[in-house]
C-alpha cells in the first residue's frame, strides 16, 4: 500500500524545479495549478500544499484562485450567540 504522504517521483521533480522564489510560467505553471487544484479538491489544505511544494501560502492561494477553485471556509469554532436552551 502506498503511503499518502509520499509524493511521486514526477511530483518531487516538479517541486524540485519550482524552488521558492523562482518564477513559474507557461506549461509548468498550468501543470502546477492543475496539480494543486486536484489535491485541494481532494481535501488537502493550502498550508499542506504550500509545505509540499516549498512555496508560500500566498503563492498557493493565488494559484488556486487563478484556477477558479472555490476556496473552503476557515475551520474552527464560530463566535456567535449560544443557542437558547429550550
Image (cartoon, grey):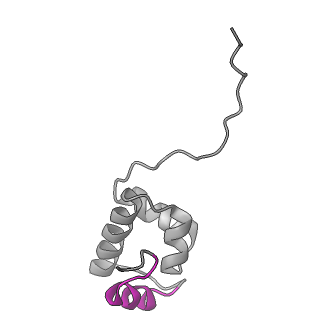
* Residue 60: percent from left, percent from top: 48, 67
Name the outermost residue toward the left: 27
Horizontal side of 64 relative to 54 (left or right) equals: left
Horizontal side of 65 relative to 74 (left or right) equals: left
Q: Is residue 58 magenta?
A: no
Q: Is 34 located above or below residue 19 in the figure? A: above
Residue sitting at x 32%, y 81%: 28
Q: Is 71 located above or below residue 57 in the figure? A: above
Residue sitting at x 37%, y 91%: 13
Q: Is 57 located above or below residue 2 in the figure? A: above
The quarter holding residue 39 reads bottom left
Q: Nearer the viewer, residue 38 or 59?
A: 38
Residue sitting at x 48%, y 48%: 72
Q: Nearer the viewer, residue 6 or 10?
A: 6
In this figure, what is the number of numbered marks? Answer: 0
Q: Is residue 8 magenta?
A: yes
Q: Nearer the viewer, residue 51 or 63?
A: 51
Q: Which residues are magenta?
A: 5-19
Amino acid at each position: 500500500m502506498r503511503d499518502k504522504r509520499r509524493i511521486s517521483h514526477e511530483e518531487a521533480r516538479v517541486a524540485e524545479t519550482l524552488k521558492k522564489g523562482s518564477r513559474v510560467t507557461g506549461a509548468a505553471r498550468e501543470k502546477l495549478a492543475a496539480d494543486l487544484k486536484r489535491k485541494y479538491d481532494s481535501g488537502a489544505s493550502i498550508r499542506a500544499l504550500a509545505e509540499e511544494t516549498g512555496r508560500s501560502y500566498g503563492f498557493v492561494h493565488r494559484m488556486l484562485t487563478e484556477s477558479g477553485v472555490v476556496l473552503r471556509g476557515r475551520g474552527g469554532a464560530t463566535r456567535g450567540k449560544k443557542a437558547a436552551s429550550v
